[in-house]
Image (spheres, coloured by chain):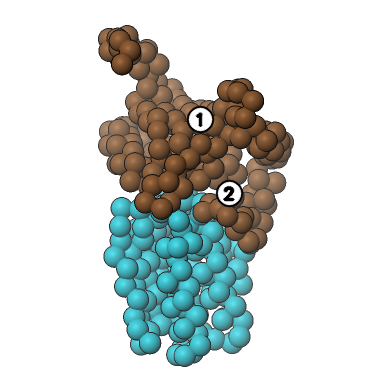
């Protein structure tokens, strides 16, 4: 299994997924034309990790803007991780937001509200 | 080409406080460059030290532009991607930012779009939030690159009713326009 590295673009997140530690990090802004297409490799990586490595997952998100279709995709990603958590696996999601960024904080809180997994909303 | 009066055109732009306007194919490359321009225009807003207003204008602008990109009744193929055509503009005076977008809608779809806007306008903030969350949980609409949440998000972010209109172009098409006014008070 391989790591996944995607460099941040002007309208897409930077992504890194490390299979040896189960650490998934995403940062930046996201409003691509086709969010589902962008997030596809992330879903594939997570599915493969869950199938082959079966280790813990820690996800750190430092996002400054998400359009609605990216919000939907990220929700689905975290939903996948929630399912893994419910199968008795160790997971942790950390949602970082800039102190003054109410919008990103709000998305994080709504996700946390809707999900049943360890999920921290952290201001920086 | 028809004679063009630049001075008159400029006067219209200045009189209406138009700070940004685009009409045409809303490709992703165009959207990215519009976003860059918009960021530059909003940068010096000293009334908004925490960038709250800037973020709101920015996110509503992107949702409006992507509604054109994904859903306009007039589209062209660019690099194998179907790209919607429309117009988007922002006006700014001392009290408000006013965002307006417009695009063609097939006559057959325009009632459905009006009904949807009316439905959103009838919901209170808690009901909008519930609808937003339901859409996040549900499957993406078929044949759509969007999540079907854009207008809900615009309603929620603006905290106002969707001010829309539908005008007849011809038997086959209507022109849908949407205006969102964002007061500058915090």
Q: Residue at x 35, y 17 (%)?
A: B13
Instruction: Tell me if residue B184 can be seen.
Output: no
Left/right placement of residue A12 relative to residue B83 reads left
Display colour for chain A: cyan
Q: Which residue is mark 2?
A: B149
The answer to whether the residues at label 1 and label 2 have Cβ atoms under 8 Å apart is no
Display colour for chain B: brown
Q: Residue at x 35, y 76 (%)?
A: A4
Q: Of residues A69 and B29, which is closer to you in this image?
A: B29
Task: Identify the image quadrant of residue A42.
Answer: bottom left
Q: Position of residue B126 (x, y in %)?
A: 68, 46
Q: Of residues B109 and A40, which is closer to you in this image?
A: B109
Q: Position of residue A56 (x, y in %)?
A: 46, 85
Q: Residue at x 43, y 78 (%)?
A: A45
Q: Earlier in the sequence, mark 1 or mark 2?
A: 1
Q: Which residue is mark 1?
A: B102
Q: Position of residue A96 (x, y in %)?
A: 41, 62
């Amino acid at each position: 299994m391989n790591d996944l590295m995607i460099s941040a673009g002007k309208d897409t997140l930077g992504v890194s997924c490390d299979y040896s530690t189960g650490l998934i990090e995403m940062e930046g802004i996201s409003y691509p034309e086709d969010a589902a297409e962008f997030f596809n490799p992330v879903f594939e990586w997570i599915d493969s990790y869950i199938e082959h490595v079966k280790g813990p997952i820690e996800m750190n998100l430092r996002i400054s803007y998400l359009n609605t279709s990216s919000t939907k995709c990220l929700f689905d990603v975290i939903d996948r991780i929630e399912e893994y958590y419910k199968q008795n696996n160790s997971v942790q999601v950390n949602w970082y937001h800039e102190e003054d960024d109410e919008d990103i904080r709000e998305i994080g809180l709504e996700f946390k509200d809707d999900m049943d997994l360890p999920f921290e909303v952290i201001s920086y | 080409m028809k004679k063009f009066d630049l001075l008159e055109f400029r006067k219209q732009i200045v009189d209406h406080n138009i700070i940004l306007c685009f009409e045409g194919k809303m490709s992703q490359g165009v959207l990215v460059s519009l976003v860059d321009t918009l960021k530059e225009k909003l940068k010096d807003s000293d009334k908004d030290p925490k960038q709250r207003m800037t973020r709101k204008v920015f996110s509503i602008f992107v949702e409006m532009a992507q509604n054109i990109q994904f859903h306009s009744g007039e589209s062209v193929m660019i690099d194998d991607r179907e790209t919607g055509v429309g117009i988007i503009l922002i006006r700014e005076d001392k009290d408000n930012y006013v965002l307006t977008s417009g695009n063609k809608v097939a006559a057959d779809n325009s009632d459905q779009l009006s009904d949807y806007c009316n439905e959103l306008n009838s919901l209170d903030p808690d009901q909008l939030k519930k609808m937003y969350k339901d859409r996040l949980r549900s499957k993406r609409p078929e044949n759509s690159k969007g999540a079907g949440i854009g207008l809900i998000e615009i309603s929620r972010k603006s905290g106002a009713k969707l001010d829309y209109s539908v005008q007849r172009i011809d038997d086959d098409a209507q022109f849908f326009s949407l205006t969102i006014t964002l007061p500058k008070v915090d």
